[in-house]
Amino acid sequence: MNRLKHILRSRYLFKIIFILSIIYVVVVTKCITYQSKYSVSDNSFIVKILEIKKDEDKISMLVKGKELLKATYYYKNNSEYNDIDIGDIIKIKGDLKEPSNNTVPNTFNYKKYLYNKKIYFTLNINSIKKIENNTNLIYYIKIIISNRINDITNSSPYLQTFILGDKSYIDDNINNTYRDNGISHLFSISGMHISLISGILFYLIKRISYNNYYNYGVVITFLLLYTFLLGMIASVIRTIVMYILFAINKLFNLKIKSADLMLFVLVICIIINPFIVYDIGFQYSYIISFTLIILRDKIKKINNYILKSLYISYIAFIVSFPITIYNFYQVNIISIPLNVIVIPLVSIIIFPLSIITFIFPFLDNILHILIKSLEFVSINIDKIEFTKIIFAKPNMLVIILYYALIYMSLCKRKYLKFLILLILFHKCYRYIYPFMNVTFLDVGQGDSILISFPYNKGNILIDTGGIYNSSYSIAKNKTIPYLKSMGITCLDYVIITHGDYDHMGEAINLVENFKVEKVIFNCGELNDLEKELIEVLGKKKIPYYSCVKELNVDNNKLYSLNNKDYGNENDNSSVIYTKLNNHKFLFMGDAGVGVEEDLIEKYNLQDIDVLKVGHHGSKTSSGKEFINEINPKYSIISVGKNNRYGHPNKEVLDTLNDSKIYRTDQDGSIMFRIKKDKLQIETCSP
């Protein structure tokens, strides 16, 4: 036994195991490509329901047959299939679909997200037939808990979160404010929640038994069952493994250092699931816990409660900083004092009260008042813009440098100045970026083009895209994250080529969630959508102009060539011409053949380098005479995949055949980087 203790105390052993585990992760997750056991042609499946969520218009399920599938069924009426639940065996018929990669750089990659969870297909369900009821005790318990939570009307979303670890029931807008304010970790079951649960349980058991082996055994058994109940959430796995190892270390007096134990926690989590290292919740949970443990003695020396809380909050903020800017490109410095206030509120009052309310539902209204107060605070703090700092997406070398300086500065204060210098350098990255970029963003059936000038001299967005009659926001999910990832904090101009929804439908979302200096409208009469935007611009005191013939940004001129009122939205489109480092760009909006004829009669537009093809490649634009006259080298068609209009038209493609054609439905976003008068082209294929 003593020899075993000696071996386990060897730091070299832990370091060797840690290095081998990292190699194991790289090999298993990066060097091996996993293939699905299903084929796209498969359309009938017998599966078990692992997770299920019933909304007003659809059922979303995680099911397992030969492998995991993410399945969705849209109701014909919302009383259908009320009798199916987790654990049930069902036969489903539907169409498999391979998830797509992100088509706008640095935005959420759904395919990669699912792949890391060993899901290779999504399934659109056509029919469901129950074969067998649930026979699994764990699922049965979860159903009882979930049904009881749903009966507690007001606080149900937060009870789902705190008890079953499912944040999807909290409103997305509220969740976004928690994330922006740096307090979203409080709503993921992790160390704080498990510590409270295990602490209460251990206290109660200790009143019955003084045998610590028995006491820890009961608590660990309960936590393992709870982990299976939650569905093996990554941050919970980390917490449970950590609890078990620290309990063993204490019970058997192994005297293994806490830092070594934390390395072993990581190793075991990796053995359980190598893909766990890509889970953001696990990354936050592990890195914060690891740092707080290795700095435990330093924290204990602080006697003042407020100062200690601020220091802990600072540690959590600074060690999670690289993860945050890598994934979300923004931090909120107010999160340090906010966490000092909110952590006790949630951990001491709201979370325990949630468990009590689950047992005694009559307390629902009290819990609801506290939750609404918390939401009110989060929403209003989120409106404070000056505390939010945007950083361009760092590469992995910068991330490594960040962590080296973070841990050096936490151990020795003299290194803090080097960390601050790195942060300032990173923040000012845009001011030393030497390239001019023109990016045609994939916004589906619509247009949105970003022109960014070198050294942060200016940024222009031509159109915003927009999906009519849809709750999905292109601005919030694509445009704004992309702008932030490039280190762009402000748009000098937003040019609205015309008032169609697919060109300006996201304009209001954009100006309400991102800094915009000026908005430019086209010539002609304003429609209702444009008037609605103008009303918002007035409230936000953003100046706007119509029928502007010329813009000058960093000595680069953008000319609006179409200043005639044709009496319809498409032909009234602003047609933008500019010459950037001797490369000619022409953006046609939705202008038709009639406008094209007027343009070649009025202007000399020969040998255009990059043409944004008019009206998504419709046959109403890109006439042969016009294309022959301008002779584009590259033709960009911004078009939605499998769109109902049949764009782009085959005749148009034939007309453009002498140029190199890029399409957003096939190539994703297309970026032209101008470097020393040369065009470099990058795509973000689906």
Image (tube, rainbow, N blue to C red):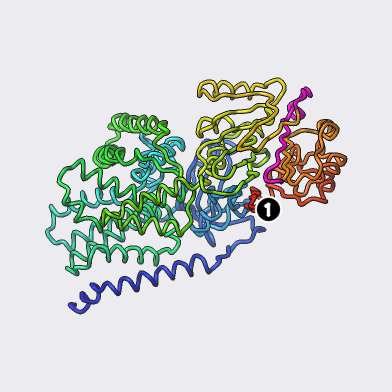
Which residue of the protein is positioned furthest toward the front in this rendering?
Answer: 555
Q: Position of residue 17 (x, y in %)?
A: 35, 72
Please say whether residue 560 is one of the residues in the magenta stretch: no
Q: Quadrant of residue 251?
A: bottom left
In-front residue for pair 501/596: 596
- Sort mark 1 into few (<14), some (14-19) or many (20+) by Cα contacts within 10 Å: few
Apparent side of residue 57 relative to residue 286 in the rendered image (left or right): right
- The secondary structure making up most of the magenta span is loop
Residue 3 coordinates in the image, percent (x, y): 20, 79
Q: Amino acid at mark 1?
A: Lys
Q: Secondary structure at mark 1?
A: strand
Q: Is residue 96 above or below residue 430?
A: below
Instruction: Describe residue 508's horizontal placement relative to residue 201 as left or right.
Output: right
Of residues 647 and 631, the one drawn nearer to the viewer in this rendering: 631
Question: Residue at 72% of width from left, 38% of height from top?
Answer: 587
- Residue at 46% over, 49% down: 327
**333 and 577: which one is in front?**
577
Q: Which residue reaches farthest bottom?
A: 3
Q: Which residues are magenta?
A: 563-582
Q: Is residue 225 left or right of residue 132?
A: left
Q: Quickly name the residue at label 1.
A: 678
**Residue 581 on the magenta segment:** yes
Q: Is residue 68 left or right of residue 649?
A: left
Q: Is residue 466 visible?
A: no
Quadrant of res 310: top left
Tell me the quarter of the image containing the N terminus.
bottom left
Image x and y of residue 336, in percent: 31, 41
- x and y percentages locating residue 72 in the rendered image: 56, 46
Residue visible at 39% across and 40% down in the picture: 332
Mark yes or no: residue 600 visible.
yes
Q: Is residue 120 above or below residue 164?
A: below
Q: Residue at x 26, y 59 (%)?
A: 243
